[in-house]
Amino acid sequence: MSSQPVLGIIGGSGLYEFTALKEVETIELDTPFGKPSSPVVIGSLSGKKVAFLARHGIGHFLSPSEINYRANIYAFKQLGIQRIISISACGSLREDYAPGHIVIPDQLIDFTRSRERSFFTDGLVVHVGVADPFCPELSRLQYAAVSEAGGTVHMGGSLITIEGPRFSTKGESNMYRSWGISLIGMTACPEAFLAREAELCYSIMAHVTDYDVWHISEEAVSVDMVMRTLARNTQVAQLAIQKLVEKMPDDLSCTCSSALANAIITRPECVPPETYERVNLLVNKYLES
């Protein structure tokens, strides 16, 4: 078995519970940004280590606005993980992305309001590039894995992240549709942007649970609807993760691992020591003298 996890998965605790995962251990971590949402579960899948983190906590007690996104991403960075898959429940804003389908989005719109959005504050200014917010290579590998697992999967589409925890009004839902947006969710931002700041490959496996509230002939979204659809899709998600791990190359040729190379604007001598200490895991290869 590989010495460190080859993949980090952020999603629901149900993903831990599949028989293909062997040699399971649970690790409690702390970070300079606080504790992550849950302990990290590490196990062997097809002879390689993978790590799971429950985004909303074990038992789902954290609302989207309460999640410590910085701690979650930093914890995976501490473990030496280079690639992250997010398993997310999303509403569909288009007819052809139907409930039960899986979408690998390629664009992201941030409509959140009250979240910590960056690792870099307090005297260190970084302008990371996120024109393409998801790793294209990891997204392609994930699409192939979901297809092989038997899921109905679509490649591409914009995902808007709203603050939550409430669902949209019909007016909001129809406005997002008029903008040409494909999916709506509550957790991709700032998670994807923090992964880029941490120079990690990041891709989303979006499970379409409903048609939001815009669809006149379908039932409006509810918690029960979301949970029922996710339960049906769990087997596909588990098999897709296993196939992704089996096909994962040692290296990807993407630029995610060098995202900060030209992003740090503050002169090294101007960075306060306490700030540098907090984020040195992320920037030491660029700021070390």
Image (spheres, rainbow, N blue to C red):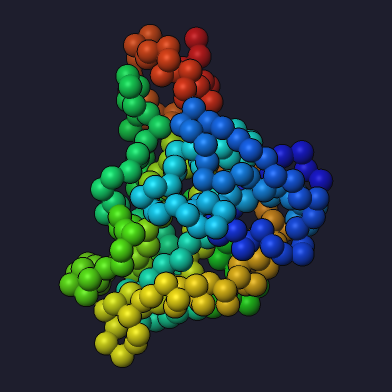
| Rendered view: 105 above or below 67 | below
Number of numbered discs visible in the structure rendering: 0
Q: Residue at point 56% right, 66% down? A: 143
Q: Nearer the viewer, residue 132 or 181?
A: 181
- Residue 2 lies, in percent from the top left, at 78, 43
- Residue 124 lies, in percent from the top left, at 35, 22
Looking at the rendering, which quadrant does residue 243 occupy? bottom right
* Residue 43 in view (yes/no): yes
Looking at the rendering, which quadrant does residue 273 occupy? top left
Q: Residue at point 36% right, 67% down? A: 183
- Residue 24 lies, in percent from the top left, at 76, 50
Q: Nearer the viewer, residue 252 or 6?
A: 6
* Residue 104 in view (yes/no): no
Q: Left or right of 220: which side holds 53?
A: right
| Rendered view: 161 above or below 289 | below
Q: Left or right of 44: which side holds 106?
A: left
Q: Residue at point 57% right, 74% down? A: 231
Q: Residue at point 48% right, 18% down? A: 277
| Rendered view: 187 above or below 212 | above
User: What residue occupies the far bottom of the structure in this picture?
Assistant: 217
Q: Left or right of 177: which side holds 101?
A: right
- Residue 128 lies, in percent from the top left, at 37, 36
